[in-house]
Image (spheres, rainbow, N blue to C red):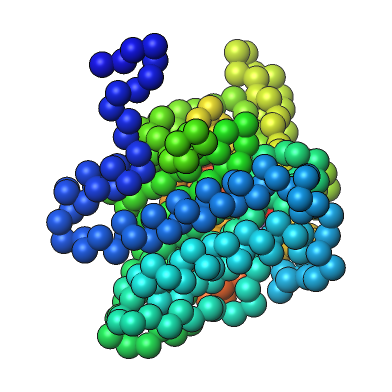
Amino acid sequence: AKFLSIESNPITLARAIMSDQRRHPEAKGDLTMILSSLMLACKFVSNAVRKAGIASLIGISGSSNVQGEQQKPLDILANDIFINSLKYCNKIAALASEEETGIYIIDNPDEAKYVIAFDPLDGSSNIDVNVSIGSIFAIWKRPDYSKPVVLEDFLRTGAEVEVSGYCIYGSSTQLVIATKEGKVDCFTLDNSIGDFILTHPNLRIPKKGNIYSVNEGNSHFWDKSMKEYVNLVKTPQDDNTYSLRYVGSMVSDVHRTLLYGGIFLYPADKKSPNGKLRVLYEVFPMSFIVEAAGGKATDGRRRLLDIKAHDIHQRSPCILGSPDDVDTIVAIYAKND
Ligand code: AHG
Ligand code: MN
Ligand code: MN
Ligand code: MN
């Protein structure tokens, strides 16, 4: 019953996971523990993001990361929060983070079956100007958890992901989680009770959209097919005109693409031949989520989830979104190759 629009049957993330678990009794609750730790981390980062301006968590920290980027205080704080939240759930053997040079091995009381890769704070260039930012993660089951964890546990394909998700610290804090059964749910943080409530169950991406999302400032460096595609969507065709929306935080641009449809592109260019986005904790999780919601994700020629990682910080061109829009650019690459 709903009185005065106060939900009398709130579905929290914990309850949603448990109902999932009932459908998969074989899962020993490990993923439940990991997702609960991730939920805690997202709440803490959300709290820090909301206080960044006051707690002088803005500007630069003076240190840089393996990516060659100037780390922001929130990059470092979010990284510490994620590591400390995941360290004690006893279910993660090791983690890879944008802000950690190598894999971070966790000392567990007994064998831990999963590894996680995450981007603790995505869209750092937007922190100081109060534009939405986020966190992104992907979880793999280790091929052989009787052995000590090794780098190879992370050098997997995106198709092998068990669960991936992102948290977006925007006008509200929302946590989107996708499972390999192709279920995508969005939970919204209710600050008054400090819990994530299921607000958008079973998200499906529109078959086609009318928004393209790319940093046109790099257009001079794009390849022929990318230039041809962007010119196509900029050419008004009968009732089919596109708008450009580009936030510069992948989480925001992908979240909008998931809900409104359309296409997000971070192509390779002459400056960065493999594009900018990192495979393990940006391209794979977002491609996994978009495919689970009925979308497509490609580098123009191949399905992104079929890539097998050879380095935890490797990059890849990234084109993802509504299936009809992705098919259009794939056809252009096929025609020109
Ligand atoms: P991060 O802040 O985690 O380093 O990621 C930034 C990424 C991604 O969020 C966004 O899509 C892209 O950088 C924007 O890059 P440009 O500013 O080159 O467009
Ligand atoms: Mn960064
Ligand atoms: Mn990022
Ligand atoms: Mn980041």
Q: Nearer the viewer, residue 246 or 70?
A: 70
Residue 298 location in percent, x, y? Answer: 52, 51
Is residue 45 at all visible to an observer of this figure?
yes
Across and down, in percent, residue 241 comes to 65, 20
Toward the viewer: 212 or 85?
85
Nearest the viewer among 44 and 302 is 44
Q: Residue placed farthest to the bottom in the image?
A: 147
Q: Is residue 1 above or below residue 272?
A: above
Can you say whether 193 is above or below 337 in the image?
above
User: Is 334 on the left-hand or right-hand side of 216?
Assistant: left
Residue sitting at 35 percent across and 39 percent down?
A: 12
Residue shown at 43% from the left, 83% from the top? 107
Residue 4, image x, y percentages: 39, 11
Looking at the rendered image, the quarter that the N terminus falls into is top left
Q: Residue at x 40, y 35 (%)?
A: 197
Left or right: residue 243 versus residue 92 is right
Residue lying farthest to the front in this orientation:
192
Residue 223 visible within the image:
no
Q: Using the image, determine if residue 37 lies above or below residue 295.
A: below
Which of 189 and 326 lies nearest the eye of the viewer? 189
Task: Give how far across and how far down residue 133 sits, in percent.
Answer: 66, 45
